[in-house]
Image (cartoon, rainbow, N blue to C red):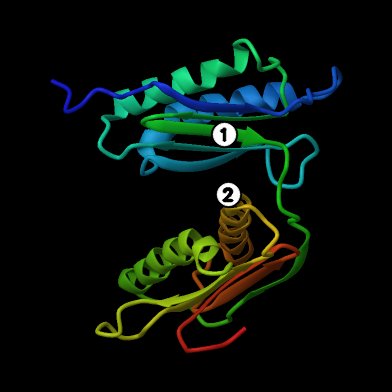
Amino acid sequence: MKCCAEDSSLVYKICNGQTFPENSMGGVYAGYVLEGLISDTSNKGFDYYYLFPFAGEADTVYGHGKCNGRLSHEDCEYCLDKAASERNKAGCPQLTIGLQVQLVDCRIRYSTGAPDLTLLSGTCNGQELHGKNNRKKVDNVLVQVVNNAPDHGYNYYDSSSPSSKPIAYEHAACNGNLSKDDCIWCLVVACDEITLRCSPKSPAGAQVHFQDCRLRYEFYQFED
């Protein structure tokens, strides 16, 4: 028996007035992004950022899906599917290069607009991070700085609990001209870049600096 049914009443719909060129893969990629958001948002904490095919590729489409956390996984998926269906309804060209639909209990968005992800620098600490708990500290604080940076002047410092040593210190910053979603997008890609750059090791400190954002963690206090 369901806990609560979703309210999929339309709040607003915004469609970009432009459409993908006929020879562009953007329209196809947008479809993939919508499908990914519909199927995976409920499994990603009801708040999921997804891009296809990958950052920096021509015609890459960036998307975001979000549901009321009280919904069941099934109801979240249904709500997002209904939101995505607005792409093909009156007032919104099928191949629009940007779409944002807000229903009462969910929101879905995609666009080709993105932060500048030109890589300026990337560094992995030569020391290895030992212990699952320390890795978990880093991951937990990364989530906090990524999500909170846009609401704290696009420049946010945080740390793990001082009661558990050693303390992980982290910093996230974005170009203040970015939208909130684009700031988070840039920082999400920065997290992925740290993983790719430093893998398979788990370093005791790392930082990535893109043109429009930067992300860093260490096990000592610092100022960027």
Q: Quadrant of the N terminus?
A: top left
Disc 2 residue type?
A: Asp
Could you tell whether 160 is left or right of 55 in the image?
left
Examine the rendering and report whether any part of residue 200 can be seen: no
Disc 1 residue type?
A: Arg
**Residue sitting at x 79%, y 24%:** 20
The 10 Å Cα crowd at callout 1, few under 14, some 14 to 19, many 20 or more, is many
Q: Residue furthest left?
A: 1
* Image spot of residue 66 (x, y percent): 43, 38
Q: Residue furthest front?
A: 11
Q: Quadrant of the C terminus?
A: bottom right
- The numbered dot on residue 181 is 2
Labelled pair 2, 1 in contact (Cβ < 8 Å): yes
Alpha-carbon span between mark 2 and mark 1: 10 Å
**What residue sits right under mark 1 in the picture?**
109
Q: Secondary structure at mark 1?
A: strand
- Find residue 134 and report its image quarter: bottom left
* Image spot of residue 167 (x, y percent): 37, 83
**Residue sitting at x 76%, y 55%:** 116
**Residue sitting at x 58%, y 80%:** 125
Sequence-first disc among 2 and 1 = 1
* Image spot of residue 209 (x, y percent): 69, 69
Up the image or down, 45 lies above or below 188; here it is above
Up the image or down, 108 lies above or below 181; here it is above
Examine the rendering and report whether any part of residue 17 can be seen: yes
